[in-house]
Image (cartoon, helix red, strand yellow):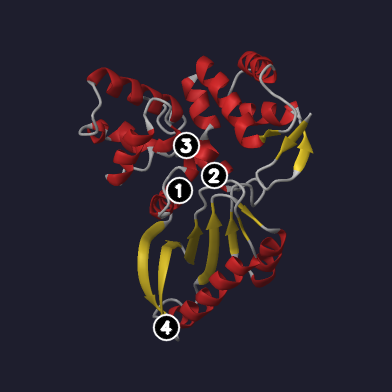
Amino acid sequence: MKVIKANGEETFYEPEKIVRSLERAGASQEVIKEVLSATEQELFDGIHTKAMYKIVFKNLKKLSHSTASKYHLKNAIMELGPTGFPFEKFIAALLEAEGYRTLTDQIVEGHCVKHEVDIIAEKDNQHFMMECKFHGAAGNICDVKHALYVHARFLDVEKTWLIKPGHAQKFHQGWLVTNTRLSGDAEKYGRCVGMGLLSWNHPKENSLRERIDRNGLYPITCLTSLSKNEKQRLLDKQIVLCHTLCERPSALNGIGLSETRKRKVLEECKIICKNKYRDL
């Protein structure tokens, strides 16, 4: 059976890919078997991967809302909004969980011109300038032009950083961060000039997906117990992470939820964040 990928390419249906994605979301073997069986009854030749994903998600949600939330992760990040600002906040929170001090949306003086920098992150002797490229669709990637642009801006900023007191011995680095993928040339160029690169699947064993899972930080757009409108109202209040709702349940006030719905949302949050909040 042929399947159409997000970039328009044709490939063949591989049930192992669905199995692996369900395993990464924490589904049990019994749930995986049921979801796969139900899904394959609805597939057809020439189906788009986006349509296939929706079928799998629908069938998984019937069996486990919390597992469906994690399975929805990649799409949930794309739902953070067209401005990209919540994505920057999300990446900054991820870095803070790893011990970095961060500042977002900063104007930084370069040697030649001023630059608007998405994230500045510091830890020990590391000092990073990070550019976040947010995409709202899976078919969009960051190509080598993005890497060239980020590196050129970093070199201009680095000249001013190096002459600051205490910075001569620091390790300075420019980063390109995206929620989708990097082209082969973008990865090759980044490695060549010593850039930091972070995408959905890169670098291996320390990709964006793996760092999210490791730190137990999930965006509120993962939640299956909230409508799209309710999620947007939380994002408008700058509530980006599920763990924020675990820590501050009152953040759910004012978006039109009944007490019963609030309890349902918080229960889903606690299950999703259980690796971070084991005592909840």
Percent position of residue 49, x then y: 65, 35
**Which residue bears the numbered disc 2?**
211
| Pointer 1 residue | 94
Tell me the kind of residue under disc 2: Arg
Element class at badge 2? helix
Alpha carbon separation for disc pair 3 and 2: 8 Å
- Contact (CB < 8 A) between labels 2 and 1? yes
Q: Which of 6 and 91 is in front in this view?
A: 6
Q: Kindly identify which residue carries mark 4.
A: 113
Q: How far apart are marks 1 and 4 (CA)?
A: 29 Å
Q: Which of marks 4 and 3 is nearer the N terminus?
A: 4
Q: Which residue is denoted by mark 3 in the rendering?
A: 216
Distance in Å between CA atoms under marks 2 and 4: 34 Å
Q: In x, y percent, where is residue 244?
A: 33, 38
CA distance separating discs 4 and 3: 38 Å
Which quadrant of the figure has residue 83?
Answer: bottom left
Q: Which amino acid does label 3 sit on?
A: Gly
Counting residues from the start of the chain, the first of labels 2 and 1 encountered is 1
**Of the image marks 2 and 4, the number of the one nearer the N terminus:** 4
Residue at 64% from the left image edge and 52% from the top image edge? 203
Describe the element under mark 4 as helix, strand or loop.
Answer: loop
- Circle 3 sits in a helix, a strand or a loop, which is it? loop
Q: Which of marks 3 and 2 is nearer the N terminus?
A: 2
Query: Please, what is the three-letter code of the amino acid marked with disc 4?
Result: Val
**Is residue 24 visible from the viewing direction of this image?**
no
Location of residue 97 with respect to 119 vertically, above or below: above
